[in-house]
Image: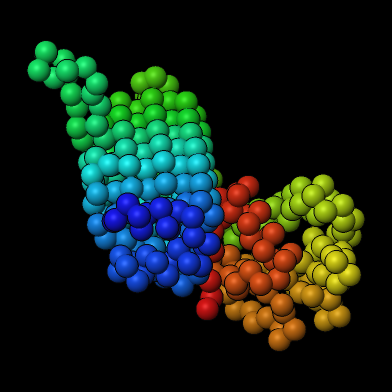
């Protein structure tokens, strides 16, 4: 990318950034993709998937291809640089203040995340090679459903398998097999995901949704907005937000469906496959298909973002 164009993209308002990248770089940009204020990207080939986001004050300069999958997020204050490719899978997340060197290819899989201040290097050297000192190159591959917690450092040439958790502040110097929980310096396996992950039945999913709804009431409605919500025996929340009456209700996998109040703005959390919501519903999130309506309603937006931020739950848009 021309340096002048890169500067223009950096200072342009977010909607103009996308126009500049489409017009002058041939970028493929999906519906709802966003680039925040004082952020810029440059790559040989650029593709931003549907509803993907590069947040404010982030710089990405790749000499190779940059592909950010659907619903993926690169958070603020992140720096990406190098001559290689950066491929980020759908629903993936790069935490704030992370640093990624992609002189060799870096791949982050589907539904995977690296936490705040993660560092990924594909090139390690400083002391002069011609005087006998070492140099190391190697791409980094991170599989699907991987969570690298805050402050993880990943060395060149590392491959991390699928369904892996690496605890915060770990230093990954070698490959990590699929299904592993690891931590330390250097990171070593301490258990397996199969031992720590619960088997979720429909009834357990109902209980999980009820627990998250109670937490949403406490953390967002009460603390953030000062709203006192009433919670009935079935777990539904009734409250008023900016003068509008709301009901948030879970539709369980089996049993009695709580009464729905058509006089309120209905937000539904559905865990039943054979049930059709009434026409009066404002928005819904389906925990079977993992699809939701778009977040036009302000309370529904807070709810979906709460699920993502606090519990790692991500939905695809229904339309």
User: Closest to the observer: 69 or 43?
Assistant: 43
The image quadrant where one finds the N terminus is bottom left
Residue occupying image coordinates x 32% and y 52%: 3
| Residue that protrudes farthest toward the top in the picture | 131
User: Image quarter for residue 98?
Assistant: top left
User: Closest to the observer: 93 or 207?
Assistant: 93
Q: Is residue 270 above or below residue 66?
A: below
User: Closest to the observer: 124 or 183?
Assistant: 124
Q: Position of residue 265 (x, y in %)?
A: 79, 75
Q: How many marks?
A: 0
Q: Is residue 217 above or below residue 154?
A: below
Residue occupying image coordinates x 60% and y 72%: 294
| Color encoding of the figure | rainbow
| Residue that protrudes farthest toward the front in the picture | 4
| Residue that protrudes farthest toward the bottom in the picture | 279
User: Image quarter for residue 231?
Assistant: bottom right
The answer, for residue 234, to whether it is visible in the render is no
Residue occupying image coordinates x 64% and y 79%: 275
The answer, for residue 57, to whether it is visible in the render is yes
Q: Position of residue 249 (x, y in %)?
A: 75, 67
Q: Is residue 62 left or right of residue 133?
A: right
Q: Is residue 287 left or right of residue 32?
A: right
Q: Position of residue 133 (x, y in %)?
A: 16, 15
Q: Is residue 158 above or below residue 88?
A: above
Q: Position of residue 252 (x, y in %)?
A: 68, 66
Residue occupying image coordinates x 36% and y 58%: 5
Q: Is residue 194 above or below residue 205?
A: above
User: Closest to the observer: 8 or 227?
Assistant: 8
């Amino acid at each position: 990318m021309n340096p002048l164009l890169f500067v223009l993209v950096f200072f342009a308002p977010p909607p103009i950034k996308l126009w500049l990248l489409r017009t002058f770089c041939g970028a493929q940009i999906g519906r709802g993709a966003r680039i925040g204020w004082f952020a810029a990207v440059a790559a040989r080939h650029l593709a931003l998937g549907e509803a993907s986001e590069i947040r404010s004050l982030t710089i990405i300069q790749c000499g190779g291809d940059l592909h950010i999958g659907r619903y993926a997020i690169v958070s603020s204050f992140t720096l990406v640089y190098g001559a290689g490719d950066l491929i980020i899978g759908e629903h993936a997340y790069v935490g704030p203040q992370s640093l990624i060197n992609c002189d060799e290819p870096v791949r982050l899989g589907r539904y995977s995340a690296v936490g705040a201040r993660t560092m990924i290097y594909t090139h390690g050297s400083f002391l002069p090679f011609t005087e006998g000192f070492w140099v190391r190159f190697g791409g980094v591959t991170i599989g699907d459903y991987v969570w690298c917690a805050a402050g993880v450092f990943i060395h060149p040439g590392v491959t991390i398998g699928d369904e892996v958790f690496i605890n915060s502040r770990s230093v990954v110097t070698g490959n990590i097999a699929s299904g592993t929980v690891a931590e330390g310096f250097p990171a070593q396996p301490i258990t397996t995901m199969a031992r720590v992950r619960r088997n979720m039945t429909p009834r357990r999913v109902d209980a999980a949704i009820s627990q998250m709804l109670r937490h949403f009431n406490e953390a967002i409605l009460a603390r953030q907005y000062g709203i006192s919500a009433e919670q009935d025996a079935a777990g539904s929340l009734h409250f008023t937000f900016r003068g509008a009456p709301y009901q948030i209700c879970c539709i369980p996998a089996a049993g009695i469906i709580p009464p729905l109040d058509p006089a309120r703005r209905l937000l539904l959390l559905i865990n039943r496959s054979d049930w059709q919501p009434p026409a009066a519903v404002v928005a819904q999130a389906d925990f079977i298909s993992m699809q939701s309506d778009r977040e036009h309603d302000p309370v529904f937006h807070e709810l979906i973002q709460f699920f993502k931020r606090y519990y790692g739950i991500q939905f695809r848009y229904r339309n």
